[in-house]
Amino acid sequence: LALKNDATLAISLPTGSGKSLVFHLLAKFTTGLTIVVIPTTALGLDHRISSNKIFENDDSINPIFYHSGLNEFQSQNLLETIKNRNTRLLFTSPEACVNGKLRRLLDDLAINGYLKNLVIDEAHIIDEWGHDFRVEFQLLSGLQKEWCKASNGSLRTFLLSATYSRHNMQTLHKLFKTGSWHQVIAQRLRPEMKYWVAKESKPAKERNADLEIGLLHLPRPAIIYFTKPQKAEEFFQSCKNNGLKTCALVTGNTPNTERQETLSKWKANDI
């Protein structure tokens, strides 16, 4: 982590091998702000909870999570905390960085030399999601260069992932190389993984029936991803109807308090 200013480090470590330790160390041993850009609200909540536990005896770090689910009072309170430099670890989304009140505040912190580290978690998403799904992921590269310039090159960038492909790395190098470029790649095969692939050309209702059969036979706990909230809601109700009681639903429409409750239950093995 002893990088020169204006440097970029891409880190690939298997899941559970300590990627979060990167931004925890940066926040602990850097005098300024470390901002961690995350792809989902659930991940941001998870990072904030674990960071609060790690730094519970260090008030100077004060990890916070700025996101769209905050009400006006909560949002303004966190912005004041950032502005007054009462935090050294900030989790947020690419959209919040690129647009809105947080963007202007971060610009000022870069100019004043307080913005020290930009960390992008699950950085392969920049290549895989950023083309048309959430373009703000790719706009982060332009923002990074603006902040580097505003801070006289004192900003360092860290790109974290467990699943870089060769194309991912080429894209990230093109987008985020400012000064020197470094890579720490420690990918490994995970022999415990098994893959079950079913190509479906049936109507949606029949596909869901096959998915239900799979869910009843696959190991649990399990997470099922959908591309649209409505599809997730329909399948969740189907699971409940089939007697799967210890399951929960989280989508972009889920209230923030309910997300936190679900995350807590997941961590406690209650769902």
Image (spheres, rainbow, N blue to C red):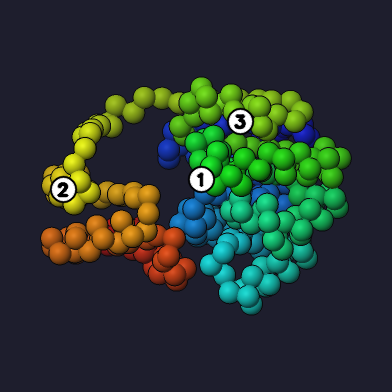
Look at the image and tell me in which quarter the C terminus lies: bottom left
Q: CA distance from mark 2 to mark 3?
A: 40 Å
Q: Residue at x 73, y 69 (%)?
A: 80
| Label of residue 206 in the image | 2
Q: Residues within 10 Å of mark 3 (few under 14, many from 20)?
A: many
The kind of residue on which mark 1 rests is Phe
Circle 3 — which element? helix
Residue 122 shows in the view: no
Residue that carries the numbered disc 1 in the rendered image = 133
Closer mark to the observer between disc 2 and disc 3: 2
**Earlier-in-chain disc, 1 versus 2:** 1
The kind of residue on which mark 3 rests is Leu
| Label of residue 172 in the image | 3
Q: Residue at x 76, y 59 (%)?
A: 105
For residue 255, what is the image quadrant? bottom left
The spot of residue 186 in percent (x, y) is: 49, 25
